[in-house]
């Protein structure tokens, strides 16, 4: 399955090109063609295109490891998701280089946590992002029918985990 996933990623990049054309009409056409060809929805095709471009362009060693069966697609998707906000190419190269050996020995869930730690360590903007995120902390109540309600708390993970355990 990993080999098939690697082939799919490479094939998508062959069809749509390694980077966005910058032409939204052409990009929509690419997404439509991929959606029809793979029999998936347009949103799924758009996500696949973005992920394939990122993996093949920024993290080609992960595609090689996927092709070799050393990791699974879930490792690749965790890497793409957790580095989506990183714009520093040097940081991405370091994160990718340090992450790959760990991906080969860890479950995708464990690997996702490792990538988060690597991003915090090697992407200097991560600290500033965390401080900005603190400003978004809060509590939200949504009232539901039948006398029910939902309580949503946005705060630091450690505190939310503690609250959930106490509840």
Image (cartoon, rainbow, N blue to C red):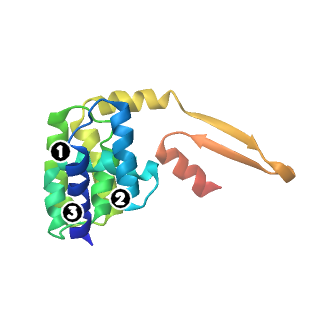
Q: Earlier in the sequence, mark 1 or mark 2?
A: 2
User: Which image quarter: residue 86?
Assistant: top left
Which mark identifies residue 37? 2
Placement of the N terminus among the 4 image quadrants: bottom left
**Viewer-side residue, 85 vs 23:** 23
**Viewer-side residue, 28 vs 112:** 28
Cβ–Cβ under 8 Å for marks 1 and 2:
no
Cβ–Cβ under 8 Å for marks 3 and 1:
no
Q: Earlier in the sequence, mark 3 or mark 1?
A: 3
**Viewer-side residue, 107 vs 87:** 87
**Front: mark 2 or 3:** 2
Kindly report the distance in space between the C-alpha atoms of the residues bearing marks 3 and 1.
Answer: 15 Å
Provide the residue designation for mark 3: 7
Neighbourhood count class around disc 2 (C-alpha, 10 Å): few under 14, some 14–19, many 20 upward: few
Placement of the C terminus among the 4 image quadrants: bottom right
Provide the residue designation for mark 1: 57
In the rendered structure, the answer to whether residue 64 lies left or right of residue 161 reads left
Q: Secondary structure at mark 1?
A: helix
């Amino acid at each position: 399955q990993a080999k098939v996933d690697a082939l799919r990623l490479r094939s998508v990049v062959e069809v749509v090109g390694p980077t966005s054309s910058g032409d939204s009409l052409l990009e929509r056409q690419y997404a439509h063609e991929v959606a029809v060809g793979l029999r998936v929805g347009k949103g799924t095709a758009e996500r696949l295109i973005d992920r394939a471009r990122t993996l093949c362009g920024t993290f080609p060693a992960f595609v090689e490891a996927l092709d070799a069966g050393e990791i699974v697609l879930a490792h690749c998707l965790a890497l793409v998701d957790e580095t989506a906000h990183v714009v520093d190419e040097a940081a991405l190269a370091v994160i990718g280089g340090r992450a790959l050996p760990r991906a080969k020995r860890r479950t995708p869930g464990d690997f996702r946590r490792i990538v988060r730690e690597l991003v915090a360590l090697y992407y200097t903007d991560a600290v500033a992002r965390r401080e900005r995120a603190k400003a978004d902390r809060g509590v939200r109540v949504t009232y539901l029918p039948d006398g029910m309600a939902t309580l949503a708390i946005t705060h630091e993970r450690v505190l939310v985990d503690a609250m959930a355990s106490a509840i």
